Image (cartoon, coloured by chain):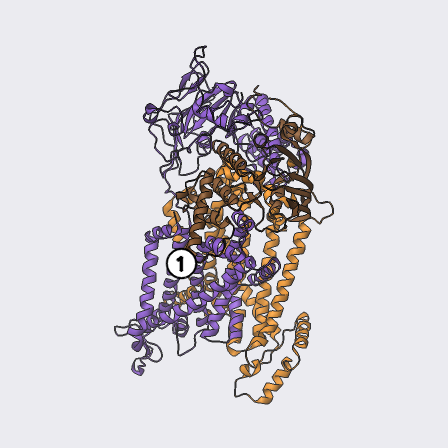
Chain colours: A brown, B purple, C orange
Amino acid sequence: MSSLELRQLRVRYGRFTAVDGVDLMVPDGGITGLVGGSGCGKSSLGRATVGLAPITGGQILVDGTPVAHRPRRGPVQLVFQSPYASLDPRMSIGAAVAEALPPSRWSPRPGATARARAAEAAHYLELVGLDPGRASLTPGELSGGQRQRVALARALAARPGVLVADEITSALDVSVQGAVLNLLRRLQRELRFSLLFISHDLAVVRYLADQVAVMDRGRLVEHGPADRVLHAPGHAVTASLLSCVPTLEENP
Amino acid sequence: MSYACRLRHALRTPVGLTALTGVLALALVALLGPVVLGPAAERVDTGAMLQGPGAAHPLGTDNLGRDIAARVVVATRLTLGLTLAATTIGVLGGLLLGVAPAVLGRRAGRGVTAFVGVLISFPGLLFVLFLATVFGVGATGAVLAVGLAMVPPGARLVQNLTASVAGSEYVAAARILGVGRLRMVTRHLLPNIAEPCLLFAAQAAAGTLVAFSGLSFLGLGVQAPSYDWGRLLGDQLDRLYLNPVAALAPGAAVVLTGVVFALVGEVFAQAGRPVRPPAGGAVAAPGPAPRPARPDGALLQVHDLRVTFPDGRRPVRGVSLSIGEGEAIGLVGESGSGKSLTAQAVAGLVPSPGLVEAGTLRFEGRDLLAERPRGTALAMVFQDPMASLNPALSVGRQLSEVVEVHERAARSAAWARAVDRLRAVRIPDAARRARQRPHSYSGGMRQRAVIGMGLMGTPRLIIADEPTTALDVTVQRQVLDLLGEVRRESGAALLLISHDLAIVAGVCDRVLVMYAGRIVEDLPVANLAGRAAHPYTRALIGAVPTLTTDRDRELATIPGRPPEPADAHPGCPFAARCAHADDRCRTDAPELVPHGTAARVACWHPLTPAAPGPGNPIPEVRDASTAQEATA
Amino acid sequence: MRKTPVPHDPADTRPAAAPAGATAGTPRAAATTARSGAETNPVDATPARPRRTAPGPWTVFALRRTGRLVVSLAALVTASFAMIHLIPGDPVRTALGPTADPALVEARRQALGLDRPVPQQFAHYLAELFQGRLGESIGAGLPVSDVIAARLPATLSLALPAFLVVVLAAVPGGMWAAVLTRDGRRRRGELAFGSVTGALAAVPEFLLAVALVACFAVAFPLFPVASRGGPDSYVLPVVALSVVPAAALARIVRVETLRVLGEEYMRTAYAKRLPARLRYLRHALPNLLASSLTVGGLTLMALLTGTVLVENVFAWPGLGTTIVQAITEKDYPMVQAVVLVYGAAALLITFAVDVAVAVADPRSTVRGS
């Protein structure tokens, strides 16, 4: 429902420049894939969009309006790579999702608000394919794929205009990865949020994204429609990444 | 299992029961002691001064004729009270100062951290003495001194704990959801640091008791006419030669109470630990049905390999495979399928409580259950190159020692060979790099160095356990290329373990697919694309998008989740998730039987006919909407 | 398999800082953490690219660590100076007692400079300190530095031998116990080791000292139990001082050894079919050094302050007896001076240990700075 635009974004950790002047546009309601080798700065870029990385220059605009560089409740939400680390082990999944809901208006009956929030949290759990009856479970009682669904529900509960998915399937097993990808695509089509999908896996990015951006050593080296970038790469880095994807077809 | 539940569990162990009994006994003595024995402890009896132990006075009397035994009992209340007061000061102060950096802003937080950093660099007793001087000699001063001296270590602990929690991704997630600082502390930080803090409080109580007794013993704590155990001990020290029991009794009380506190801490620690399985025998036991080695002279023969753990997990359940000279085999499966443990069992590296059994486990004709493989014939490459090299030794040393040990090579010759092998695995500037420790190598270079380590001798079989999982895609390709090259040049066989079919397909001749501890399919790599017979293999291929996957269709998914290594499943382990499963699948486990000319499959309903023919169309994996050929 | 020339390989030529946490968690999760470690963890990412103009990690470490030492020393000096002002009421009056002659009190106040403004006193205190003068004791009027010079050797002559005993007993003992009980072997041995060292570590030093005195004074008069004399007079104090830290250190060494034995590089060493001797001495021991050194420094610090109580039991003429006596007699300049000496010793020990750890384990230097 919103577009995300980065203008000359720069992220530095001490003396190490992780993101070096990146211009990137994630169009409204579209899926943009961001690929690159490890250490290329793609995760730093993702974290910077929600203020979790030290931004030393440039601007982040959502629908043309600059957003704060500090982590706060904003129109951009991030789903982290590891569902094992991104959920509070002591908090029930229902509470985790409810915490993400927008602050509710004051109600004369305190119980009513809490019940309404719980019902809404249950709705989001249902949306990602989890039984709302299991809202009282803690993350430790769920499998990796289920946890990633909770993380997705939590991010969506904050009603973001832009969702950033940072390697969300790389900690999951192969058989689970497909289900999470299907879910993400279905939700994006239903809810029409803009999606920045960060991954090292070109095949996954190709499957999801309309636009693909390629990063290398902190810089954006290529950006364009997915089909064009992945079939006729215009930059040596993209070509190298493509050649390194192991596939079943090219057997000896 | 929740913390409260584990705590209840820990309380039922012998340690827990002892701790509980000890706490109750202490509480009783502290409550009732002064009431019952108070008069006896205060009664001055000039007729019975400085007596030794006797019937009337079990521990003798002091210089005013007061009964020492009674005084030790009565002193319990004061000692415990002061200890608890000081502990409370210490723990609360530590919590406040420790959580402060998370609540205050960045700059104020840094100030607090630095302040605690300066405080912590002084020994605790020095603090106590300093504060005792400032507050003056006496009980109040001592409580403040001992309590405040406990603050810096407590604050440091809480700071470290909150820092690790505050750096966690779930706190980052809460921050981008706009959760406020106070709520962050109460909902996310405190619940996640509560357990170690409880443990610290118990240990702090034990430490406070000792410190306090020490102060009183030195005459800097409780002053007459009050008395605690330390004071009693100090008073009786001069008469140690005449009545040692009188001096040792309060000391024993301090030690016993300290032990009770330590036990309470142990209970908290136990409750905080995840439940550990009981250990069992670590020795490989002979399998039930030893089979004669097959006469085909395979390099590695495994028949009916099983790995079990004493807690009931059975991650490997009857694996049979054989690897010929120079052959490259891929072993593929999801996490928990038992693929890594299969490899570790072959290499004799199953972690301790695991029990390895096998009908046959032969390498180069020798029984691996009876002896370890000779010298350098078996080389291992592990998953995480960051962890598999010793950080304290130079890389060259770690390579050269292999031949020093196994071939009794001279040091210089071994070093020369190490440099040569590093060069062979394309480490740039190998002579210089060999002298460096692993931390100055990149991940890909480390993995190449580990491969080079395997090449130091004359490897017949290289077992590579997820060798590229921890590496970047581009580096992954280089390492895989290197493995293939090494295999061609050395003639060694390769067992490549991976979760990724595509990786295996690029390097291997044959693929074994594992599921729930069993091999479900054994097929030539050429058959992977479209001619896999087992529904699970098909689904694995279909679930992973490739560069040619149809973008308009949903990815194939496997419903449900893999069985746990402890689950019992009488039939086919995949039956619960399989679209083709029938009653037979659920009750009878299929054996791995030959399927066609080059493959084996463990399935009652293989998806390809044993002999492919025109009248046998390949069935779909699931219903038409989700099924697809990944490589169509 | 198709071979493609790779134009450049940024990730593969830079030195990678090992993600220390990569061993935790499930292997699959750990692997993915390690894979993206350079991106998600800024600390690991920092040394990822060579810095041209920046000082080397060693310089940064040395500057930082020396800075910390200086700050701590300054804090120590300030605290010891402030002590006399923190005491409620008039310290000289408190020290000399309520019956003392007001003229004498005033004279002492002037001698101590307490009648001057506080900043001026502090400047004077610092100036004196840099010339090695620590003031005069309130009661006797003796120069404090003379007393310290006389008493410090006695304390050191207890602490250093005790430290040697601790290290020589605890490090091999803890390692041996770990090797014997690794992977849950010999549960009984583990239990025995745990309970014996646990019980010993729970006994406070001064109680052990009292018990030793009781034992050897009453039952077996083999060793002298009071005051400093011939070599045999050292036996009991050193034993009293070293048993508790030795037990505690042995426990820690055992846990650390078990941790090292569980590391993947130990599995690599095992997979290389190295003999046990090489695996333990060459592969495990160096990795124990860093953590053992740190704990060893803390032990030495604990020994130093442990002397306070043990000296009092054995009537040992060291700093410990001096400070206790000074506190009871309210001889504040003396307390100030002894606190300074103990504090400075503790700071120097931790400084030396940190430098030693940095030399033994260069990774900690890089990570810490």
Which residue is more in the foreground, B77 or B190?
B190
Q: Position of residue B316 (x, y in %)?
A: 40, 31
Q: Left or right: where does residue B379 sit relative to residue C109?
A: left
Chain of the residue where label 1 is placed in the rendered structure: B
The three-letter code of the residue at mark 1 reads: Ala
- Which residue occupies the extreme front position in the image? A108
Q: From the viewer's side, name the closer residue of B262 and C318.
A: B262
Residue A91 visible to an observer of this rendering: no
User: Compared with residue C46, is residue B430 higher up or lower down, i.e. above or below?
Assistant: above
Q: Quick one: which residue is furthest to the left in this view? A: B55
- Please state which of residues B17 and B114 is positioned toward the viewer in this rendering: B114
**Helix, strand or loop at mark 1:** helix
Residue A142, image x, y percentages: 43, 41
Count of residue discs: 1
Horizontal relation, residue B487 to residue C235: left or right = right
Where does label 1 land, which residue?
B262
Other residues around mark 1 within 10 Å, as few (<14) / some (14–19) / many (≥20): many
User: Residue B387: x percent and y percent?
Assistant: 54, 39
Seen in the picture, residue B205 relative to B303 is either above or below; the reply is: below
Q: Residue furthest right?
A: C53
Write the residue at 52% across / 43% down: A156
Q: Is residue B185 visible?
A: yes
The spot of residue C290 in percent (x, y) is 56, 49
Instruction: Compare residues B196 and B546 and report the one nearer the observer.
Output: B546
